[in-house]
Image: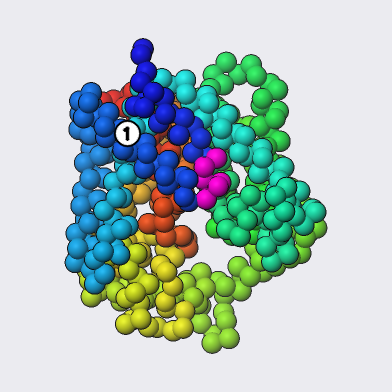
Amino acid sequence: MKHNFLLDILPRWVIILMPILLITGPFLSDLGTSVVAILFLVNSIKNKLIKYYDNYYFKFFFLFCVILILSSLFSNNILVSLKNSFFYFRFGIFVLCFWYLLDRDKFFLKYLFISILVCFSSLVIDGYIQHFFGKNLLGYELFNEYRVSSFFGTELILGSYLARFFPILFGLFIYLDSSKKNKLLLFFLTIIFILSEGLIFLSGERLALFFMNLSAVYIILMLKEYRLYRFWTYIASLSLIVILLNLFPNAKDRLVDQTIRDFTKNNDDKIYIFSKPHNDMYITAYRIYLDNKFLGVGPRQYRNECHDYIVSEYSCETHPHNTYMELLSETGIFSFLIVSTLFVLISFLSLKHLILKIFYKEEGMFNDLEICLLSAVIISLWPFSPTGSFFNNWMSIVYYFPIGILIWQRNKISKV
């Protein structure tokens, strides 16, 4: 099959290198996403790739983009809001390009697996060096004297990166290791898996630690192959974390003691959702939604509108720190329904898969690669936790990254 450099080879290598670009920060990763989207649009026109747009996935995504743009047009800061909504379509086009390239050459998943594995290996080595010696290989010091950030520097997203890409790495390994003969790779992966989950703990990111556990339980319950392997690596990871808890009390104070304090009673004798700052931001976001039910106040406009809905000194931040409250307040009920319906649908199908597997001894709804990818999507859509901004470019790339592989896999089973 003949491959065009600009339309096939370049986008493929940008996607393969995307896990590395994400470590460098938002600029190169967003640039890479935009390049892939533009080249695929050109490719679509040149080669009439209509089938990648004529499906339910893209139609609902297109509707979502229209809602975002309408929300921006009716906001009080049209140009500022449009900067975030008008080009949001690039993430969906990125997914379609991923799907198209897999149709052309599924073997490039091998190189993607290697890319993610190199990232994990580098972060594990560098992260533990930073933890034990106070500085990493680039000279970045520990944040707050104990939180590990590795190559991310002052951006405390190491744990989030590892937790969100871990299911993708594991799923690709299952997909590629169909012969189950590579014992050396399996041993190496076991070490990387255990140490990376320990590193998530050392990053001090409570949400990342929760997502690590959530995806692990989901995968263990749902997998057909490698279920026992994932179970024992998870137990080993938890054992390492227990050891680290006892050896490093600063990490324990943040991840355990502070979490208990945030969830339980404070000086004003009230119980809050996650913490008082989160609780007050959610109330503020809900009040904004009540006055702007259909289209919200515009993407990334919570920061500008929250001043009119003050609950306390914690009310105003750049975003309300929960995906669904952000969607309600900034883009209204319609976008909220699209995203929440997707989460409910995945949850329903996952439950159906589990019932078929346990009670009827059937294969279930999904193969093992899809299970791992779905766990990555569930992490992104999980409603019952604080989150980063839904419209953050770096986070959006991470959200959409597993979807291209997932759609490619589902399309192989049944055309949509």
Q: Magenta: predominant secondary structure element?
A: helix
Q: Residue at x 70, y 28 (%)?
A: 187
Q: Residue at x 71, y 36 (%)?
A: 191
Asked which quadrant contains residue 233, the reply is top right
Residue ranking furthest to the top = 1
Q: Is residue 34 above or below residue 113?
A: below
Q: Is residue 378 visible?
A: no
Q: Give the image location of residue 322, x and y in percent.
A: 42, 63
**Front in this rendered view, residue 124 or 410:** 124
Seen in the image, is 248 located left or right of residue 194? right
Does the magenta-highlighted stretch encompass residue 149? Answer: no
Asked which quadrant contains residue 410, the reply is top left
> Which amino acid is tagged 1?
Leu
Q: Give the image location of residue 296, x and y in percent.
A: 25, 67
Figure disc tally: 1
Q: Give the image location of residue 195, x and y in percent.
A: 70, 43
- In the rendered view of the protein, which quadrant contains the N terminus? top left
Q: Is residue 5 above or below residue 398?
A: above
Asked which quadrant contains residue 404, the reply is top left
Q: Is residue 15 visible?
A: yes
Does the magenta-highlighted stretch encompass residue 22? Answer: yes
- In the rendered view of the protein, which quadrant contains the C terminus? top left
Seen in the image, is 298 located left or right of residue 152? left
* Label 1 packing within 10 angstroms: few (<14), some (14-19), many (20+): some
Q: Give the image location of residue 73, x and y in percent.
A: 19, 63
Q: Residue at x 37, y 72 (%)?
A: 303
Q: Residue at x 47, y 23 (%)?
A: 108
Seen in the image, is 44 located left or right of residue 133? left
Name the residue beneath numbered marker 1. Answer: 39
**Front in this rendered view, residue 249 or 129:** 129
Q: Which residues are magenta?
A: 20-25
User: Which secondary structure, mark 1?
Assistant: helix
